[in-house]
Amino acid sequence: MGTGMGTGMGTGTGTAPGTSRPAVPSAAARPWVMLALATVGFAVNFWAWALLSPLGPKFKEVLHLSPVQQALVVAVPVVVGALGRIPVGALTDRFGGRVMFPLVSLATVVPVLYLGLAGHASLAGLLAGGFFLGIGGTAFAVGVPFVSAWFPPRRRGLAIGIFGMGMGGTAISALTTVKLATAHGTATPFLLTAAALAAYAVVAAAVLRDAPARMVPDQPLWHRLAATARLRVTWQAAALYAVVFGGYVAFSVYLPAYLKTAYGLAQADAANRMAGFVLLAVLMRPVGGWLADRIGPSQVLAAALTVVGVAAVVQAFTPGLIPVGTAAFLAMAAALGAGSGATFALVALLAPADKVGSVTGVVGAAGGLGGFIPPLVMGFVYGQFGSYALGLGALAVVAAAALVLDSTAVRTAVAAPRPQRQPART
């Protein structure tokens, strides 16, 4: 392994026929600067991706939407963004983050402007604009392979965890969208976000550089996706991420409704507590990556899943909100954030160098889609039984199943010897 901030991805020498070939070295750039720019890009694109959710109640009132229609407006960009990570991750393996970050950002500008200027006036416009707004959600699958290539294995967990903090872009949207729309008109948050996306695309195109020894696959897209599907790490990490990141997404969406129903909190109080949950999870993501670098991703995931399971069991009994309920939810937030960071430390460790983006796409899609099942289950359970106990009990069971997977197959894969990669450029 090279010294300093090498990539750990090869030296740029030739490879055997039929294998990946190294990219032509780009201009030298510092890994931490690249990480900072990637994180900003992730945050800005996620800010755009989450624009419709805060305005859902307003659209429901103005356009006379049914609850199902309102849910569809919010769900479309999230589902498209989750599934879109699969091809975008594979394209990032091929073309690199230097191309894909500006491209994704500029492509997201179009639906943002459309929604702000015209699309918000009808249900059809919201659905069409929301579909293409999902492009912003694919930025995650660009950043993980881009950042991973810049850092040696011993630092990838921390680096990818820091990049993951860009998911806080959804908090920017939650805190500003409604206020801007109320004060200055519905178009304002969309126009502001479009300007931020365009500015980032210009800066990214001028400053971003792919790691000098980034491995470029030489197989067609569908061949690479098929090969990715045959990797055990793809589905192991996808299952784990569906639980840890899916749990984060689910609570960030459903927690206000839960707190209002279970504890009778006012909407503003419930929203503030949800913001605290989100903030703690975001801050713990790089901590999880950092710990994974030091003690191993499987060990961090085991601890996180144990905490989630225990906290879910405690909360199933609906204890007093202060202090037990609050402690249970904050423990879950910390564990879900740390587990999310550790999952992509696992991907960076086990995935082949030229398939990190493809694996990230599938795993990221699983996490995004995993966030939609728990709110549906919680709503159904409460509607049937007038209690959330069974829903939280189901979360504990799922966490226990994920813990078994991590403690057996995943831990064995991590411990298995792997072919030594060529030393990195320094």
Image: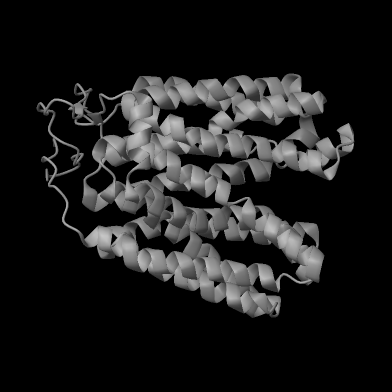
In the displayed structure image, the side of residue 23 where residue 71 appears, left or right: right
Indicate left or right for 71 with 342 as reference.
right
Residue 149 percent coordinates (x, y):
27, 37
Question: Is 3 above or below relative to 254?
Answer: above
Q: Which colour scheme appears in the figure?
A: one colour
Judging depth in this view, the residue of 351 and 187 nearest the camera is 351
Q: Nearer the viewer, residue 229 or 245?
A: 229
User: Which residue is located at x 39 percent, y 54 percent?
Assistant: 236
Identify the residue at image location x=22%, y=53%.
Answer: 154
Q: Residue at x 68, y 56 (%)?
A: 375
In the rendered view, would you say 289 is above or below 193? Answer: below
Q: Position of residue 202 (x, y in %)?
A: 45, 19
Q: Residue at x 52, y 69 (%)?
A: 308
Quadrant in the picture for residue 73: top right
Q: From the viewer's perspective, is 187 left or right of 372?
A: right
Residue 276 visible here: yes
User: Nearest the camera: 333 or 66?
Assistant: 66
The image quadrant that residue 208 belongs to is top left
State how many labels appear: 0
| The C terminus sits in image quarter | top left
The answer to whether any part of residue 97 appears in the image is no
Indicate whether 187 appears above or below 49. above
In this view of the protein, which residue sits in the foreground, 205 or 120? 120
